[in-house]
Amino acid sequence: MIIDLSEKFIMYDERGRNKLAWVEDGILKLKVDASFRKAMYELTYELKGRNVCEYCGKTFLDEDMTLDHMIPQERGGPTITNNLVPSCRECNSKKSNMTTEQYIHYKGLRESEKKQYLQNFKLYVERMKENELLELQEDWISKKEVSEILVRFDFSQEYKKSKYRKVEKFYKEYGHLPKPILVDRKGFLLDGFISLMFAKDNNLRNLSVMVLENVEVII
């Protein structure tokens, strides 16, 4: 898939001296030690603004703003510009794990209808997990062999911590990983390290991935 980019985007290190990520000829170039998630946040702010909430339309100071995943992370939503919007903290909290469309529908209900909607919504989310269904567009997702995914890894790094146990618990309960991992156009891992390591540890052969065709890691 192609993610939304700003033609003039550049992300520097903390000292403002070295480029960590930049857009060149329509491709986001990302140094191997740069944070992909931070690059997505900065790109989203550049593309969509920083201070006006997508949901209530009000203007806020920086410290009162967040970025919201239109398709929530826990329901497979990726951290990419196409899936992020500026949101005030209050709206982000109220939206919870609904998609943007579901939240807008929920806001339009009468107060007497909202409790029943939330009960039905909870059952709906559980069925989606049980059947390995996501809110994502089908053409966003493909399959890759675990062995085809490239990753830079320090073998002294301990990764079997709380996030790993969370993935492990989800897999035991539902028989699949929580969401697709993200890779660049050459198959280099961008996001989903813990899921990839769980797959390697448990000899899982194929993974659901999102290939970002206009992102390239520079090694």
Image: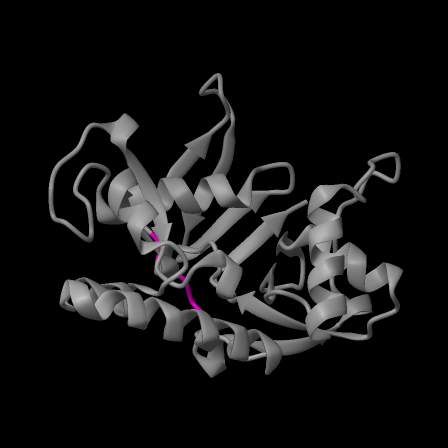
Residue 34: x %, y % from top left: 58, 37
Q: Considering depth in this image, is 109 or 89 the residue closer to the camera?
A: 109
Residue at the far top: name it. Answer: 15
Taking the spot 88% from the left edge, 34% from the top edge, the residue there is 156
Q: Which residues are magenta?
A: 1-5
Magenta includes 173? no
Percent coordinates x, y for residue 189 in the rendering = 66, 55
Q: Which quadrant of the figure contains the C terminus?
A: top right
Assign the magenta stretch its main secondary structure.
loop
Residue found at x 48% / y 16%: 15
Residue 128 relative to residue 48: left or right: right
Q: In the rendered image, which quarter is residue 102 located in?
A: bottom left
Q: Along the horizontal axis of the image, is 174 left or right of 204? A: left
Q: Is residue 108 visible?
A: yes
Residue 212 pos. (x, y %): 52, 64
Give the camera-side residue of 63 and 149: 63
Above or below — where is 83 with respect to 116?
A: above
